[in-house]
Amino acid sequence: MYQALYRKWRPKTFDEVVGQKHITETLKNQIITGRLSHAYLFIGTRGTGKTTCAKILAKALNCQHPENGNPCCKCPSCLGIEDGSILDVVEIDAASNNGVDNVRQLREEAVFSPVSVKKRVYIIDEVHMLSTAAFNALLKILEEPPEHLTFILATTELNKVPATILSRCQRHSFKRLDSEVITAHLEHVASCEGLNLEHDAAELIAGLAEGGMRDALSLLDQCSGAADITVDSVYSAMGLAGNRRTAKLLDYTVKRNTEAALELFDELWTDGKDPATLLGELNTLLRDCMMLSVAPRAGANLLSGRFDKEILAVFCKKLTKAELLCRINTVSDYLIKIRSARSPRLCVEMCIVALCDPSLTEGLDELRARVSRLEYDMSNAPMARYTGDDEDYAPVEDIPYDEPPARPSVEYDDDELDASQFAEYQPEDDLLDKGVSPVDLNPDAAPEAKDAPVDNVLLWAEIIDKAESSLPIGLIPILSDPTQARCEVSYDTMHLYVVPGFFYGMINNQDVLMRLRDAANDVTGRSLKIQLSELVAGDSKPTRTVDELKKFKEVRFI
Ligand SMILES: [Zn+2]
């Protein structure tokens, strides 16, 4: 008969328990020294080994030949407890036996000495589920326990256990297991079971198990049908292939392609995807992006493991932290709304519309997100400025003005979104292939790096070049002479400084100014205003810093 992996690999001694050494060592010591408590409380999330350790402790307490604190697993007591034939060790699930009658019955039995072992042990799982009356009845035995009695209580929710019970128990907190610990154990189990488990797949399963070894082994069991257990086979066994479509949906909203996003949702809806689940997945995806964004080196432990890291890295680069936060808030709001919504479908559709155009639901978060987007875009297209230092007129190797980042809208022709598709249409995604760590891809990190002064001499030269054919010939040498004329382009204005005199008069002519402005618009791709001022000898103006420009921009655009 096939035995589930998590049962087959259930630890039988303290030494076999993975990742809870702080507890198993303490318990072993107590067995060795005989300093035992009559009541233990094991706290921890599901699948972290609470009931397993309770059972091992029950065996160790009764073992005839304990070995260094571990049960021997060979004596009649150990074997009897293991197969459940010794009735002095009782496992109770408080979730289904939560009434006061159950506990009263337990109290009546408890007074009798054990029949075949030294200690009568009650293991009460999910003890927080007991009713108040049942807790009170339990408290009576815990207050004056007979010598032969040991209680091992286990709970996932410590806050629901009354303080009067807590104070009478020795508490042990079970940790969620690290992904690495689970991964290593999965690989060990797989090799013993003759399963061909890829390392990446083991990591993925570990991530999905969220710190629980039992869940991890159950997942491995589910995937064990495949000849080779790969990331893809895990995705398909878990029914997570759809998560890539969730990533695609998010991508459409990032590109503000509302139509495509709604069409994709319609497809998902037709395929039977639950709307609330979809919103939950969107939030998990956004959360993972945020984790990768704020703690890129923290590793897989912080991630849900439901999405490819490559996809997350791409979104990290596309969305600033403020934008991520804003989207998480939006989706969370709709997750609350969907519970009471008459039409969950409408709810998701409105959520998609809001994600595509955050300005529709403009609050502080959305404004912050927009400002951060402007800053990011601006830092990618740095403002040129004149430093007032003539030495800066030496040829500059870096071209000070870049085209604003292209935001191509590309049609997906494949149903499944994958990282290689991102790489195709996002030229800057090449960074991924060059092994750039996610922190380097973080748009929020960009502005500081771009704050260095940028000379705009080349930009001005380009503008003159462009306007040359349409300007009076005599003006070109003047405009090209930095002692006669200088130019600064701020966010939406081209500031022109010319030494007062004859040429100033020539330039201060609507026709000439319009031509210069048109040339500047052509070169920068923006719609600029032009402003002419007198250039005073030795004048250090204009020296607006990029910071000032940013402030200026924020005031105008919020
Ligand atoms: Zn034994």
Image: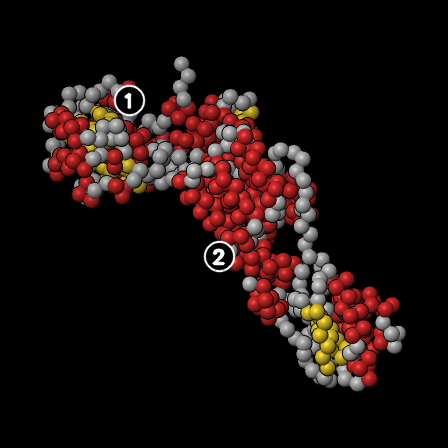
For the residue pair 372 and 209, the one nearer the viewer reads as: 372
Name the kind of residue labelled 2 in the image.
Gly
Residue under the point 19% across and 23% down: 88
**CA neighbours of label 2 inside 10 A, class few (<14), some (14 to 19), many (20+):** few
In percent of width and height, residue 384 lies at 69, 67
Ligand 1's image quarter is top left
On residue 82, the disc is 1
Q: Is residue 366 visible?
A: yes
Q: Is residue 286 above or below residue 5?
A: below
Q: Where is residue 135 in the image (x, y as percent from the top left)?
A: 18, 36
The residue at the point 22 percent across, 25 percent down is: 90
Residue at the far right in the pictured view: 473
From the image, state whether disc 1 or disc 2 is nearer to you.
2
Sequence-first tag of 1 and 2: 1
Image point 16% across, 35% down: which residue? Answer: 133
Disc 2 under 8 Å from ligand 1? The reply is no
